[in-house]
Image (spheres, rainbow, N blue to C red):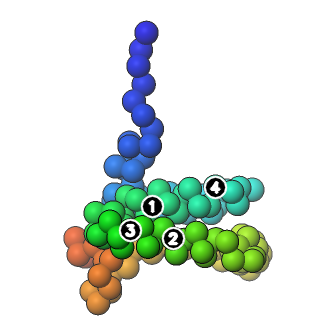
């Protein structure tokens, strides 16, 4: 019987490229009816792939805790309403690679900003 590889490790490895992470987020936010319940999972996947290599275990756990706090605030679905509101204007939310060298979460291997 053929065996399949676990998906999660493959996903996290593929999201280690900031461009792929940006496209992953973009795909989630551009869904016609995005599931608000999946937002935490999508953001956590990106945090795991991009944050863990750059952060100490303590910083990473604190970052995930901040995500939980952010998403537990009233009106966390606001981002979807903002996206719909912007779409009506012919605009969309974007995810961009941060190139600010002052930011310790920056990936110095990325030479320029890319907006998707």
SS at badge 1: helix
Quarter of the N terminus within the rendering: top left
Mark 1, residue position: 46
Q: Disc 3 and disc 2: Cα gap in Å?
A: 9 Å
Q: Disc 3 and disc 1: Cα gap in Å?
A: 12 Å
Q: Earlier in the sequence, mark 1 or mark 4?
A: 4
Tell me where residue 16 appears, x and y as whole percent: 34, 57
User: Residue at 62% across / 61% down in the picture?
Assistant: 39
- Residue closest to the eye, 78 or 65: 65
Number of marks drawn: 4
Q: Residues within 10 Å of mark 2 (few under 14, many from 20)?
A: few
Tell me where residue 90 appears, x and y as whole percent: 70, 76
Q: Are marks 3 and 2 in contact (CB under 8 Å)?
A: no
The circle drawn on residue 60 is: 3
User: Residue at 36% across / 73% down in the picture?
Assistant: 59
Q: Disc 1 and disc 2: Cα gap in Å?
A: 14 Å
Q: Disc 4 and disc 3: Cα gap in Å?
A: 20 Å
Q: Disc 4 and disc 2: Cα gap in Å?
A: 17 Å
Mark 2, residue position: 65
Q: From what the image shows, is residue 63 above or below residue 3?
A: below
The circle drawn on residue 38 is: 4
Q: Residues within 10 Å of mark 3 (few under 14, many from 20)?
A: some
Q: Residues within 10 Å of mark 1 (few under 14, many from 20)?
A: many
Q: Are marks 1 and 2 in contact (CB under 8 Å)?
A: no
Q: Earlier in the sequence, mark 3 or mark 1?
A: 1
Quadrant position of residue 113: bottom left
Return the residue found at the far bottom.
Answer: 102
Q: From what the image shows, is residue 45 above or below residue 72?
A: above
């Amino acid at each position: 019987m053929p065996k399949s590889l676990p998906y999660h490790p493959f996903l996290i490895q593929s999201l280690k490229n900031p461009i792929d992470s940006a496209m992953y987020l973009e795909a989630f936010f551009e869904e016609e009816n995005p599931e608000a319940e999946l937002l935490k999972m999508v953001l956590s996947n990106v945090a795991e792939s991009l944050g863990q290599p750059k952060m100490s275990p303590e910083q990473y756990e604190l970052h995930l805790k901040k995500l939980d706090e952010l998403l537990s605030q009233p009106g966390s679905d606001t981002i979807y309403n903002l996206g719909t509101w912007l779409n009506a204007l012919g605009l969309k939310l974007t995810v961009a690679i941060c190139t600010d060298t002052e930011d310790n979460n920056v990936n110095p291997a990325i030479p320029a900003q890319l907006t998707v």
